[in-house]
Amino acid sequence: MSLKKSFSFAHPRYWPTWLAIGFMYAGAWLPWRLKLGVGRLIGLAAWRFAKRRRHITETNLELCFPEMDEQAQAALVKQTFIANGIGILETATGWCRDPEHLRHRVTFKGREHMARAMAQGKGALIIGIHFSTLDLGGALHSLFFPADVVYRPHDNALFERFMTRARRHIFGAAIDRHDLRGVVRRIKSGHAVWYSPDQDFGRDVSVFAPFFGVQAASIKLTGKIARMTGAPVMPLIFHRNPDNRTYSLEYLPALENFPTGDEASDAARINQVIEAAIRRHPEQYLWLHRRFKTRPRGEAGFY
């Protein structure tokens, strides 16, 4: 980074970002019970005051869990905010501390599936999911398997630098989500690449496929990458356990007969894998994002 660029981060507009970075460093070193308590308070404050995000979360849960009564949905909304508040401190821990200090807190099932996939010499495409534990899950995963990560660059240049540097301590490489060639190149050279295909990136790169029974814009790239590389596609599930002190990671077997060449069918298959993982611990999913933002033409929006 140029000296001029470094000096620009001293501008007052970056002072709040510096405070946020300082908070994350401090939070990463809090005692575990205090860390959970602070995260819970953040989540409760967001649940109380972030009305726009609460509306988005309520809408998502109404769409995805229509079988729940109003009281159960309201409880899940609150639990979601608490889990994602704790997730901020978990992200801080994953980014700012050596994951080795958490080895005793993680159980990793299905490692034989990933070992078998990597033994083929074709690399692997890891299907991650936007749980609140996403970045901590990446750090814990690095204790067992090396991987690269596909990510969305942050709009704030200072936070982007902080985030990218942190992820490069965890992952072999951090690849811009627009850099398809980079992803394919890394996989073809034998690397595993962690990729999360569960967000709405718009009509141009998506097909509509069911997600919790609702048509959702689902990106086509998963099947395309698998087809271009021949790499096994490996679903990865990770969550915080009910004791709030330990974590579970689990590889499922590589997807069979994937891709099929039918973009809608392939997207639906990935959505099914993601949905099944979410149902294990629905409160830990990032329901705060507008998963159903893009609608089929002529259909009214949900938000």
Image (tube, grey):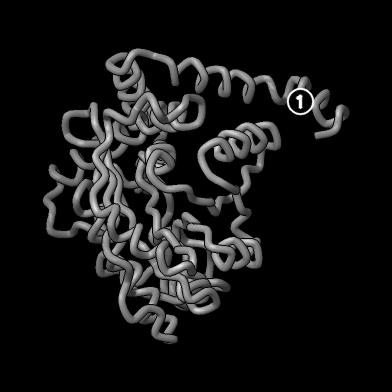
Residue extending farthest to the right is 4
Q: Is residue 79 left or right of residue 296?
A: left
Q: Write the residue at 23% across / 26% down.
A: 245
- Number of marks present in the image shown: 1
Secondary structure state at the residue bearing disc 1: loop
Whether residue 97 appears in this view of the structure is yes
Q: Is residue 48 left or right of residue 151?
A: left
Whether residue 218 appears in this view of the structure is no
Q: Is residue 240 above or below residue 238?
A: above
Q: Write the residue at 30% across / 34% down.
A: 83
Q: Is residue 12 above or below residue 205?
A: above
Where does the N terminus fall, quadrant-wise? top right
Q: Write the residue at 53% across / 74% down.
A: 229
Where does the C terminus fall, quadrant-wise? bottom left
Q: Residues within 10 Å of mark 1 (few under 14, many from 20)?
A: some
Q: Nearer the viewer, residue 164 or 209?
A: 164
Residue 235: x and y, percent? 33, 60
Q: Write the residue at 34% across / 28% down.
A: 102
Q: Is residue 110 above or below residue 245?
A: below
Residue 99: x and y, percent? 42, 30
Q: Which amino acid type is shown beneath numbered disc 1?
A: Phe
Residue 149: x and y, percent? 53, 51
Q: Which quadrant of the structure image shows residue 258?
A: bottom left
Q: Is residue 187 left or right of residue 47?
A: right
Q: Which quadrant of the structure image shows residue 198?
A: bottom left
Q: Is residue 54 above or below residue 255?
A: above
Residue 42: x and y, percent? 38, 24
- Quickly name the residue at label 1: 9
